[in-house]
Amino acid sequence: MTSADVPLTEAETDPTVRILDADGRIASSASAERYLPIVDALGDDELEQLYRDMAVIRAFDRQATLLQRQGQLALWPPSHGQEAAQVGSARAARAQDHVFPSYREHVVATIRGVDPVDIIKLMRGVSHGGWDPTDPKNGNTHLYTLVLGSQTLHATGYAMGIAFDGRHASGDPERDEAVIVYYGDGASSQGDVHEAMVFAVSYQTPQVFFLQNNHWAISVPVATQSRVPLADRARGYGMESIRIDGNDVLASYAVSKLALDDARAGRGPRAIEAVTYRMGAHTTSDDPTKYRTSDEERSWAERDPITRMRTYLEGRGASEAFFQGVDDEAAAFAADARTRTTQLEAPGRDAIFSHVYSEPHPLIDEQRRWLADYEASFEEGA
């Protein structure tokens, strides 16, 4: 069975929220009406930024894939095709919000301030985490999670802490906090996600569950995982859940903004299912030609989120100079990542002991001494 066995019209019918159709035109539908004022409030600069974010990260994503193929990285999870869902939701978050990614949210991390080479460090194997989530420059972005599903528990626990500390529902939008957690259709079948939703609803956490349904959990199609829309899983726990066209950056932005605003205001958790498609492999160790068809890939390529937004901006009068400038910026961004990746050095011996505990610990000190003595013994016998 493939995901193509379920007609796309069934997978994307209303109440799916779509603002931009595949041809880059505003698509007015009943499900989108409540979100149109949010989009109407965006100026040209903000709309162009959404396009720039998507185009730049795709260039970086392609460069990182090439770096892996050339032996510079151990692994790379491509985000090609999922840019709109990620960019819209990330731009909808406020500075004080906390972000819990899985391991494919490259543009979410960079929008929040994470250096893209810090992501590469993790995939190159020279860092245990990639970046310091407590560093203000990283925009409250927590670490990538390779044990998928567990990030929803981490996010729910943090959101419970926000609620217990009274850091939301004060009526001050500049102060109140929310959490957004990213996960995929495959992770949505894991127990951790369902346990997280139970606690989120029970404690009415200020939280948004953002599910990127990219149709494939490695080689398992979403049709095998669920006989109903994945948004219904969150509804089953009593959580308001909205299904969006995940290749529409405007829908992602508007729905995420309202959901996060509601969460901050104390209206409880929200869930979003972004119906999108993973155009690339699950990771660079995967071969998607073994389990999906070229017709399916071609069908989704026609709904490319970047092409869709470009057409919309062209209709609004964006100049060719703007698009050329974005292309130049994207090329420079990717080239810089390549240069700095090739300059990365292996970490020192002590790095393995860092960040195990937040404070000095006698057991870690003992292990550090043991390793130093062990390595020194080889030198003595030489």
Image (tube, grey):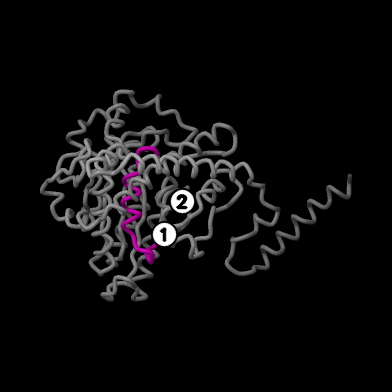
The label shown at residue 154 is 1
Q: Would residue 336 appear left or right of 80 to someone viewing this image?
A: right
Residue 300 picture location, percent across and down: 29, 32
The magenta stretch spans residue 149: no
Nearer to us in this view, 308 or 201: 308
Badge 2 crowding class, 10 Å Cα cut-off, few under 14, some 14 to 19, many 20 or more, is some
The label shown at residue 145 is 2
The magenta stretch spans residue 85: yes
Q: Tag 2, which secondary structure?
A: loop
Residue 166 picture location, percent across and down: 33, 76
Residue at 21% across / 35% down in the picture? 23
Residue 137 picture location, percent across and down: 49, 62
Are the residues flagged by discs 1 and 2 in contact, CB closer than 8 Å?
yes
Note whether 208 is above or below 165 in the view shown.
Answer: above
Nearer to us in this view, 71 or 156: 71
Quarter placement of the C terminus: top right
Residue range in magenta is 80-99
Q: Would residue 371 appear left or right of 310 to someone viewing this image?
A: right
Looking at the image, is mark 1 or mark 2 earlier in the sequence?
2
Residue 74's quadrant in the figure? top right
Nearer to us in this view, 193 or 78: 78
Residue at 44% across / 61% down in the picture? 139
Quarter placement of the N terminus: top left
